[in-house]
Amino acid sequence: MEHCVIPPPEGFAMTIHGASRPPDWKDLYQLAILETDPAKLPLLITKANDAILDQIEQSDAVSLEGELALLNDALHALRLLRREYERCLKEFGEQRNERKVG
């Protein structure tokens, strides 16, 4: 008997038992960091950033104690990624416009 595997909807991940669950901040962070398509990057950065901030807001100080450094590092990395994306967009966008004009 063959099993049909239907992928989870975008934005959800599969558990080991096959049930879908919303991604946690680490999943979204990893998706943003590993994305190679510039068109998808801004949305993924925003989703990851929002998920990290939600994690901070929803957690108490005791549960955040061990994770706070990771969350701060992830927010910093996303800021750097966004800055680099914007720098490249400006740099290469201007080069494309110069080629069209010239």
Image (cartoon, grey):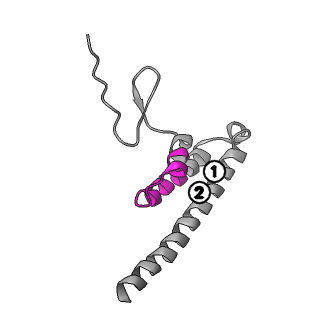
The residue closer to the viewer here, 28 or 66, is 28
Look at 50% across and 46% down and name the residue there: 31
Q: Work out which quarter of the rendered image holds the N terminus and state it.
A: top left
Measured along the vertical axis of the image, is residue 11 above or below residue 21? below
Callout 2: SS: helix
Q: Amino acid at mark 2?
A: Leu
The residue closer to the viewer here, 67 or 42, is 42
Q: Which image quadrant for residue 102?
A: bottom left
**Are the two marked residues, 2 and 1, in contact with CB atoms closer than 8 angstroms?**
yes
Residue identified by numbered label 1: 74
Asked whether the viewer can see residue 36, the reply is: yes
Residue 62 coordinates in the image, percent (x, y): 72, 37
Look at 44% across and 37% down and name the residue there: 22
Is 12 positioned to the left or the right of 65 in the image? left
Asked whether the viewer can see residue 51, the reply is: no
Is 67 positioned to the left or the right of 46 in the image? right
Residue 66 coordinates in the image, percent (x, y): 73, 38
Callout 1: SS: helix
The residue closer to the viewer here, 35 or 66, is 35
Measured along the vertical axis of the image, is residue 82 above or below residue 48? below
Q: Which image quadrant for residue 49?
A: bottom right
Look at 59% across and 57% down and name the residue there: 78
Q: Which residues are magenta?
A: 30-50
Residue identified by numbered label 2: 78
Query: How would you rate the neighbour count of disc 2 (Cα within 10 Å): few for under 14, some for 14-19, many for 20 or more?
Result: many
Q: How many marks?
A: 2
Residue 3 coordinates in the image, percent (x, y): 29, 17
Q: Is residue 32 magenta?
A: yes
Query: How would you rate the neighbour count of disc 1 (Cα within 10 Å): few for under 14, some for 14-19, many for 20 or more?
Result: many
Measured along the vertical axis of the image, is residue 4 above or below residue 52? above
